[in-house]
Image (cartoon, rainbow, N blue to C red):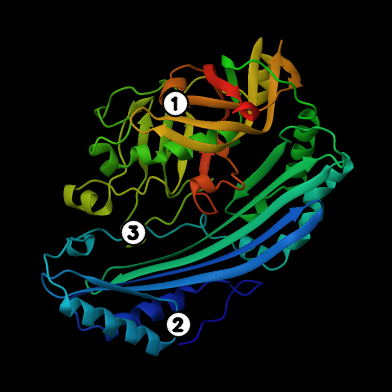
C-alpha cells in the first residue's frame, strides 16, 4: 500500500484520500465479524515559538491513529488502536479485536452503525486549503520577520507563536457506510515587551486564526500587538466593582468556549448545565443574540461528520436570545430523528438585529468603561448557573469620556454569560477570534470561534489580579 502523489506544491503532511480508502478497505476485507468499523485519524502540526526575538522552538510532527471496532452478535464490542500503516499490522489489529470480541460477554451497546442514516454532505473548500499545507514547510518560518517587524519598530522585544495544522479522517463499516474528509488550520499571535526593566503589567496581545493561510496578515497582527503593548505600559491600580465593560473578540471567544458544553444534550438533560431547567423556546439572553454551529461556516466550518462518520448539520442553539436547540449525540439524534450536531466543533455568536458597533465606536460612546482585550485562566465555578472566573490579560484599559484614558492593572472577574448577556448594550460584527496559548480550553488548535466585540453593563470585576 503506497501513498499516492500529492497535488500540492509541497508534499501533503497527512494521508491522502486514496490512502485512507485503501486502509479502510484492507481492514474491512480482513474482518470476519458481522458488525465492524474502522476509523483513521491522521494529524500533522507545525509550530514555531519566538521569545525575546529568537526562535526558541520549532516543531513539526504527526500522529496517526487507526481504530478497529468489532462485535459479534449481541455481545459487547472490542476495539484495538494502532499507529502502523503496513498491511500486516492492520490485519493483526483486526484479528486481535475479533479475538477479544469473541471472549466478551454482556449486552451489546447500540451504536449508530445499527441505524439507517443519510450519507454526509461532501466537505466544501472552506475546510481544506493547500496554502496552509504549503505554509507548514516554508512560509511558517519566512513569515516570522514580517510578524515581528512592527514590534521592533516600536522599540519592543517580541514573543510570538506561529502554528499550522492539517488533518485527514475516514470512517467505514461493514454496513456500507463511508465518510472521508480533510481540514487545515493556522494561527498567529504576538506580544510586545520593553527591553528594559520598565513595569509593563500585562503587555498587549494580538492574533489571527484562519483555515486558509492566505488570509493571514502578519504585519497587521504585529502592528496591533505593538499598539496595544505601548498603550499597556505603566498600568495603574483601579478600584474593582461592577462596571461597563467592552470585551474584545479574544475575550468573548474565551468566555464562549467555556460555556460550549452547556449546549450538549446529555449534560443538560442530566441537570448539569444552566439550561437544564429551561425548555426550548424560552428566552435566556438578550433578544439580539444568535448562536449557531455550522459545518459550512465560511469563517470556520468543520468536517460535516463526527469521528464515527455520523452526519453533522447546521444547528441554531440561540435564536433571538431564545433557546432553540441542543447538541444531540449521534445515537440520540439518529434514534429520535433529530439533526446531528457536534456543538463544540465551531461556534458563531452574532447579532440577530440592531446596529453594529466597532470597538472604537463603543469606546467613543462610553462615559466610563473598562476595555478588556483578552482573558486567561477561565474556570467555570458553578455549572448550574454558568458562573465563571478568570483574569484580564493582554491589555486592560480605563475608558473615560469616549477615549482610552490609561492602562489599568489586570482584574479578576466573576460573572456568568447568562447574566451579563442580559445586560447587553451593544455588539459588533462577528469574526473568527484567535486563542493563542489557552490550555484551559484544550489542545491547540481551538475549534473555530466566531464572535463580535460586546459592550455590557455591570460586569463584575471582583479584585485586582495581582492581589488574589
Quadrant of the image containing the N terminus? bottom left
Q: Position of residue 11 (x, y in %)?
A: 62, 75
Q: Nearer the viewer, residue 46 or 267?
A: 267
- How far, Cα to Cα, is label 1 from label 2? 47 Å
Q: Nearer the viewer, mark 3 or mark 2?
A: 2
Residue 86 placement: quadrant: bottom left
Please give the residue where the numbered disc 1 appears in the rendered image.
416
Locate residue 272 relative to residue 211 in the image: left or right. left
Residue 120, disc: 3
Q: Nearer the viewer, residue 219 or 5?
A: 219
Provide the secondary structure element on which disc 3 rests: loop
Q: Nearer the viewer, mark 1 or mark 3?
A: 1
Q: In the image, is residue 63 above or below residue 464?
A: below
Q: Residue at x 63, y 68 (%)?
A: 60
Q: Position of residue 170 (x, y in %)?
A: 39, 68
Instruction: Spot the residue most to the front.
Output: 467
Provide the secondary structure element on which disc 2 rests: loop
Q: Residue at x 30, y 49 (%)?
A: 340
Provide the secondary structure element on which disc 1 rests: strand
Locate residue 103 relative to residue 198 in the image: left or right. left
Q: Is residue 451 visible?
A: no
Answer with mark 1 or mark 3, whichever residue precedes in sequence: 3
Residue 85, disc: 2
Q: Residue at x 24, y 28 (%)?
A: 279
Amino acid at each position: 500500500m503506497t501513498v499516492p502523489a500529492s497535488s500540492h506544491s509541497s508534499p501533503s503532511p497527512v494521508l491522502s484520500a486514496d490512502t485512507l480508502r485503501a486502509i479502510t478497505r484492507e481492514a474491512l476485507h480482513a474482518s470476519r465479524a458481522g458488525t465492524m468499523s474502522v476509523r483513521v485519524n491522521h494529524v500533522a502540526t507545525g509550530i514555531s515559538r519566538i521569545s525575546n526575538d529568537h526562535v526558541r522552538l520549532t516543531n513539526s510532527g504527526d500522529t496517526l491513529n487507526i481504530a478497529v471496532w468489532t462485535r459479534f452478535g449481541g455481545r459487547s464490542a472490542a476495539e484495538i488502536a494502532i499507529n502502523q500503516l503496513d498491511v500486516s499490522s492492520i490485519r493483526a489489529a483486526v484479528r486481535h479485536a475479533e479475538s477479544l470480541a469473541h471472549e466478551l460477554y454482556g449486552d451489546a451497546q447500540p451504536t449508530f452503525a445499527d441505524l439507517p442514516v443519510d450519507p454526509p454532505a461532501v466537505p466544501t473548500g472552506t475546510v481544506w486549503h493547500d496554502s496552509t499545507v504549503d505554509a507548514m514547510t516554508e512560509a511558517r518560518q519566512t513569515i516570522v520577520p514580517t510578524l515581528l517587524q512592527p514590534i521592533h519598530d516600536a522599540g519592543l522585544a517580541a514573543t510570538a507563536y506561529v502554528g499550522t495544522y492539517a488533518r485527514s479522517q475516514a470512517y467505514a463499516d461493514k454496513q456500507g457506510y463511508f465518510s472521508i474528509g480533510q481540514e487545515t488550520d493556522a494561527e498567529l499571535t504576538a506580544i510586545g515587551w520593553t527591553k528594559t526593566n520598565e513595569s509593563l503589567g500585562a503587555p498587549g496581545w494580538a492574533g489571527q486564526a484562519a483555515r486558509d493561510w492566505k488570509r493571514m496578515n502578519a504585519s497587521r497582527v504585529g502592528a496591533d500587538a505593538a499598539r496595544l503593548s505601548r498603550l499597556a505600559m505603566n498600568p495603574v491600580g483601579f478600584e474593582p466593582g461592577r462596571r461597563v465593560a467592552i470585551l474584545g473578540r479574544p475575550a468573548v471567544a474565551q468566555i464562549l468556549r467555556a460555556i460550549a458544553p452547556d449546549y450538549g444534550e446529555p449534560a443538560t438533560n442530566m441537570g448539569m448545565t444552566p439550561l437544564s431547567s429551561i425548555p426550548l423556546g424560552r428566552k435566556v439572553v438578550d433578544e439580539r443574540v444568535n448562536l449557531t454551529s455550522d459545518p459550512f461556516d465560511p469563517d470556520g466550518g468543520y468536517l460535516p461528520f463526527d469521528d464515527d462518520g455520523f452526519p453533522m448539520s447546521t444547528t441554531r442553539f440561540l435564536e433571538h436570545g431564545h433557546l432553540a436547540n441542543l447538541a444531540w449525540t449521534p445515537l440520540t439524534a439518529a434514534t429520535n430523528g433529530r439533526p446531528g450536531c457536534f456543538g463544540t466543533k465551531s461556534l458563531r455568536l452574532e447579532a440577530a438585529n440592531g446596529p453594529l458597533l466597532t470597538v472604537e465606536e463603543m469606546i467613543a460612546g462610553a462615559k466610563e468603561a473598562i476595555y478588556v482585550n483578552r482573558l486567561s485562566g477561565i474556570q467555570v465555578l458553578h455549572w448550574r448557573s454558568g458562573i465563571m472566573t478568570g483574569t484580564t490579560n493582554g491589555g486592560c484599559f480605563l475608558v473615560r469620556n469616549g477615549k482610552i484614558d490609561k492602562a489599568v492593572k489586570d482584574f479578576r472577574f466573576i460573572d456568568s454569560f447568562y447574566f451579563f448577556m442580559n445586560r447587553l448594550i451593544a455588539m459588533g460584527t462577528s469574526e473568527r477570534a484567535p486563542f493563542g496559548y489557552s490550555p484551559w480550553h484544550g489542545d491547540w488548535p481551538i475549534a473555530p470561534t466566531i464572535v463580535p466585540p460586546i459592550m455590557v453593563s455591570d460586569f463584575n470585576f471582583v479584585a485586582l489580579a495581582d492581589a488574589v
